[in-house]
Amino acid sequence: MLLYILRRLASAISVVIVTLVASFALFFLAPTDPAGVICGNRCTAERLEAINESLDLDQPALTQIGLYMKGIVVGRDYVTAGGVVTECSAPCLGYSYTLGQPVTKMLAQALPVTMSIVFGGAIVYFFVGVITGTLAAKHRGSPLDKITVGGSLLINSVPYFVVALLVALYATVLPTSAYHPFLDNPVLWASGLLAAWLTLGLTNAASYTRYSRASMIETLGQDYIRTARSKGISERRIVYRHGVRAALTPVITILGLDIAFQLTNALFTESIFGLPGIGLLTLRAFAQYDLPVLMGGVLLGSVVLVLMNLVVDVVYTFLDPRVRLG
Amino acid sequence: MTPYLEITDLQVEFPTQDGTVRAVQGLSYALPLGRTLAIVGESGSGKSVSSMAVMGLHDPRSTRITGSIKVGGKEIVGMSERNLMAFRGADASMIFQDPQSSLHPYFTIGDQIMESYRAHHRVSRKTAKARAIEMLDRVGIPNPGRRVDQYPHEFSGGMRQRAMIAMALVNDPKLLIADEPTTALDVTVQAQILDLIADLQRDFGSAVVFITHDLGVVAEIADDVLVMYAGNAVEHGPVKQILGTPLHPYTWGLLESIPAVSGTPGPLHPIPGSPPSLLAVPNGCAFHPRCEFRDRVADGLCGEKLPDLVARTADPDRLSRCHLTGPDRIFETDILPRLP
């Protein structure tokens, strides 16, 4: 198992490196002019060159990639024209062109926001979805089942940002959205995120209702459920112990991948509710040609995706005793 | 001897959009403790459906059951879910065809046996586990103390079926229903499982209903045989007589379609046609469209009137549902010479 995780991590690192090189190529070789952006409108040629030099933008592309990767692993120093050395310790992702802050620090500030939104929302949609899906499957064909399926289809057919906008505009009973660090004040943290959680949670719960319902219906048709019934145990125990245990496994796989996807795509939630997460950060960087921030965001996203895939595989071994990694 | 299991005029129907599926129509039989009844028939003959009804396993929302099923004096048809829960697994239990899919893959063998035991006994986990180990040992699983904590996928097919049997017998039920328990197993393992069931039955003195389509298995294990066709019993009697001198043309057909191991190899005699759809069972005797002897009954009676299941020879234990007169003579003159 440990060996498997190490092997997977090694291959994960190679995936991240490929992503890094590809995004580096896209961003840095594209016809953009970072030095011009930093320098501003009234820029002299000398100043432009000095900026290019201090950011190593005058180096060949390969060298730039090498320096960038070295920065991530051991850190790097930026020397400005005046000879001032700025130390950027590992993992160094460079400095924001527009804000002058280290990208690592900006990401480190934004990541907890995104994680709070996504994991909080995931708890809502997972539990709501599994409970309603299981109930619908248990009472398959009943009015409850039909309402659940119809309702979830209806919710799913409305674009997410429309729901989010409606909540943001009209659900004024909810506390105002704002981010307060959990460690400062957990109550404020939760109340500031509540609207985002409910929006993300309830819209996705519709999908999870349908996943769980389908998975549960399939499970309840299995031979081992008939065996359980023939043992004389209660219907509740059959559904919630024997059924849910088996039905949840595929749903949890989807959950892992959904969380990974949302961590890198919480854009709508963050911009509509004004929460300063990764999505908002990269969106702003994109609008301002702030390449180091964009690069950092992409890199973080690929790390998150690869890690979540690994987590799903490891969790699977705990859920299904037949699965052994190796 | 008073029968432990007594089924009277059982009908099991499934209403569907295409019409009513009449899976079991007017089935009656009785089984005392200590005896094994083999129910034989093709797929769709109603042998499994009737046995599921004995366990009260049909979903009342999609099944119509009439008639009477008495197990140890308790009426199962129409029994409340609460009483059924106390009945299942305690008074009667069931082993299924495929032990691979019939055991829950996510729980250990021990967990599943303990759950069965604790559903009917107020005991601690520890006591239940000791009981599970005892049962695994009883069904011949080596090293049960270690095996009890393993998952079904760590067991071989035969071992899984032994574990299923241990689970079914953990509460000492007086009635055991085995639904083709050896069909999914290797031939060598089949014999072991049959021996085990016969052995346990002697020890526990229970009544066993053994569902199969394998006449070899019937010869091995049964005291009595019930032959079913299209949801009805067509022949019922002691195993020796049924396999030796069957009275019903359908049973003749079954016997003739077995390839002979010894003797001169010759062509098989399969029964022509296929079993009828249970949505539209033929009038009269359900077997008559496939029966090569129907012309020996006068006035096309076979297509009009369903014969009763009654004794048709001097032996009162032998029941048959056929209009033919002197079927034992027909068997001796017409069928026996064809059999290898």
Image (cartoon, rainbow, N blue to C red):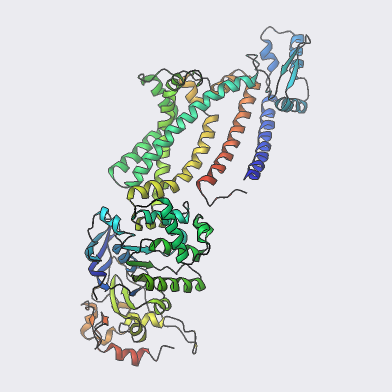
Q: Quadrant of residue B329?
A: bottom left
The residue that appears at 49% across and 30% down in the rendered structure is A119
In the displayed structure, B309 sits above or below A173; it is: below
Front in this rendered view, residue A271 or B117? B117
- Residue B178 on image: x %, y %: 38, 67
Q: Nearer the viewer, residue A324 or B141?
A: B141
Give the residue drawn at x 23%, y 76%: B284
Image: A324 above or below A79: below
Which quadrant would the N terminus of chain A be assigned to in this image?
Answer: top right
Q: Is residue B16 left or right of residue B130?
A: left
Residue A321 pos. (x, y %)? 52, 50
**Residue that sits furthest to the top in the current view:** A42
Q: Position of residue A244 (x, y in %)?
A: 41, 46
The front one of B78 and A26 is B78
Snapshot quadrant of residue B9: bottom left
A246 over A56 or under it: above or below: below
Determine if residue A137 is in view.
yes
